[in-house]
Amino acid sequence: MFDFLDSDWFIITLEIVFLILIIYDLKKYRETKKKEYITNIVLTFGFAVWTLYPMYISYFGWEDEEKVKMISTCQESNNTKLCRCVDDAIFKGYTHDEYIVLDKNSSEFREFLKEKKEECLDDSWF
């Protein structure tokens, strides 16, 4: 139901909203010098870090060389679009260390791959 939470556009939109809120509070603080605007800025920044940090950790958990190795093993199949989509889902879902330790034959990982393949092949708007 909440598949949009994993999309990059949602993350970008969320970042823009946080920036607008912080800029607005900075502007109001300069005009009025009220301390509650400083509180709003600190709370907004704290909430932004709390919300966006888990999303960014997956991007920084993979080195470029590790991504190339992962993608090169997937290029053997005929459907490169599906391959890229599943690779991106793995990059977002797991850090490299988690992926190395992960049991690739576990039912949890197979279910994850099955869901991501279905999402990648689905052309609907939702």
Image: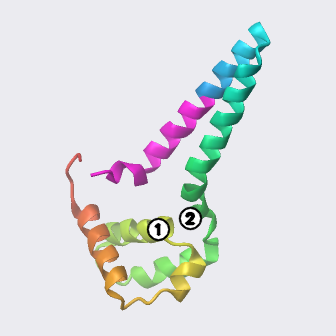
Asked if residue 27 is among those painted magenta in the image, a careful observer would answer no
Q: Residues within 10 Å of mark 1 (few under 14, many from 20)?
A: some
Along the polypeptide, which appears first: circle 1 or circle 2?
Answer: 2
Could you tell me the amino acid type at mark 1?
A: Gly
**Residue 70 position in % (x across, y down):** 50, 80
In the rendered image, residue 66, in percent from the top left (x then y), is placed at 59, 78
Q: Residue at x 51, y 81 (%)?
A: 99
Q: Which mark is residue 26?
A: none
**Residue at x 23%, y 46% (from the top left corner):** 125
Q: Is residue 110 above or below residue 11?
A: below
Contact? badges 1 and 2 (CB < 8 Å) = yes
Looking at this view, is 125 or 1 the one in front? Answer: 1
Magenta segment boundaries in residue numbering: 1-19
Mark 2 crowd level (few <14, some 14–19, many ≥20, 10 Å Cα): some
Q: Position of residue 76 (x, y in %)?
A: 37, 84
| Disc 1, SS | helix
| Residue 16 colored in magenta in the image | yes
Disc 2 on helix, strand or loop?
A: helix
Q: Which residue is mark 1?
A: 93
Residue occupying image coordinates x 70% and y 13%:
28
- Majority secondary structure in the magenta region: helix
29 to the left or right of 82: right
- Residue drawn at (19%, 50%), measured in percent from left and top? 124
Q: Position of residue 27 (x, y in %)?
A: 71, 15
- Hey, what amino acid is under mark 2? Ser
Residue 104 falls left or right of residue 44: left
CA separation in Å, label 1 and label 2? 7 Å
Residue under label 2: 58
Horizontal side of residue 114 vs 36, given as left or right: left
